[in-house]
Image: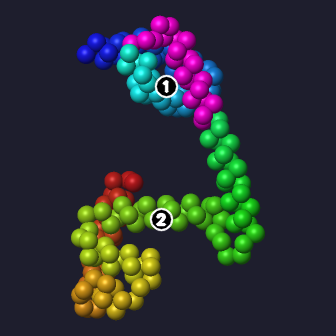
């Protein structure tokens, strides 16, 4: 319990200061809040915090936060290089979707996934196999071990469920 109290005291005494310091450094309150939390998580997971060996808390917090900033910068450089390479490859190959098209598709898939929440497994599987994988009713029936007529019923059930979900979301202004 002594270690837990030490960590709680460290957080209570220095959280606001660290977040302010990071906000001045980054110029972004959201990024500063995220990095502040990451800093305390890093300390919680370190041996120093477990041993109570932090002698100068602000210096230790600053050093930890700076290391996380460096890690973050390195990650951003790698991400940018990767995205540039993907854009270059996508631009040189015919028929490949643009980044905007990929984003729209991913958003649509998330909406479909949300609409399918609460649907029984077989109607969901029938819907996904038919509309996303473009399987025939007969192929789906064979995969699910049901008749083609049952696949048709599953698809109707799934579409009605999705319609109800979309109506519910629009009524709530989402």
Q: Is 94 placed left or right of 115 in the picture?
A: right
**Above or below: residue 111 compared with residue 80:** below
In the structure shown, which secondary structural element does the residue marked by tag 1 occupy? helix
Q: Which of 109 and 160 is in front in this view?
A: 109
Q: Nearer the viewer, mark 2 or mark 1?
A: 1
Asked if one can make out residue 11 in the rendered structure from this viewpoint, the answer is no
Quarter of the figure with residue 71: top right
Residue located at (38% from left, 15% from top): 51
Q: Mark 1 points at which residue?
A: 39
Identify the main secondary structure in magenta: helix
Residue located at (30% from left, 89% from top): 142
Residue located at (26% from left, 68% from top): 119
Quarter of the figure with residue 10: top left
Q: Where is residue 5 in the image (x, y as percent from the top left)?
A: 30, 13
Q: What stretch is highlighted in magenta?
A: 52-72
The crowd level at tag 1 (other Cα within 10 Å; few <14, some 14-19, many 20+) is many
The crowd level at tag 2 (other Cα within 10 Å; few <14, some 14-19, many 20+) is few
Please tell me the numbered disc located at residue 101.
none
**Above or below: residue 15 compared with residue 131:** above
Residue located at (31% from left, 84% from top): 143
Q: Earlier in the sequence, mark 2 or mark 1?
A: 1
Locate the N terminus by quadrant. top left
Q: Nearer the viewer, residue 140 or 71?
A: 71
Tell whether position 77 is magenta.
Answer: no
In the structure shown, which secondary structural element does the residue marked by tag 2 occupy? helix
Asked if one can make out residue 149 in the rendered structure from this viewpoint, the answer is yes
Tell whether position 64 is magenta.
Answer: yes
Q: Is 62 placed left or right of 112 in the picture?
A: right
In three-dimensional space, the C-alpha distance between marks 2 and 1, rounded to whole angstroms, equals 35 Å
Q: Name the residue under label 2.
A: 108
Locate the C terminus by quadrant. bottom left
């Amino acid at each position: 319990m002594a270690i837990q109290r030490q960590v709680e005291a460290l957080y209570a005494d220095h959280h606001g200061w660290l977040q302010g310091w990071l906000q001045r450094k980054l110029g972004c309150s959201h990024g500063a809040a995220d990095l502040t939390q990451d800093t305390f998580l890093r300390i919680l997971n370190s041996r120093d915090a477990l041993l109570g060996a932090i002698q100068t808390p602000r210096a230790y917090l600053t050093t930890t936060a700076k290391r996380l900033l460096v890690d973050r910068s390195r990650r951003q450089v790698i991400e940018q290089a990767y995205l540039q390479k993907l854009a270059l490859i996508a631009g040189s190959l015919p028929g490949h979707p643009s980044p905007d098209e990929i984003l729209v598709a991913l958003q649509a898939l998330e909406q479909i996934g949300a609409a399918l929440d609460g649907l029984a497994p077989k109607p969901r599987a029938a819907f996904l196999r038919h509309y996303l994988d473009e399987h025939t009713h007969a192929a789906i029936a064979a995969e699910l071990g049901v008749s083609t007529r049952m696949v048709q019923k599953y698809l109707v059930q799934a579409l009605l469920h999705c319609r109800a979900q979309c109506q519910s979301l629009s009524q709530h202004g989402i």
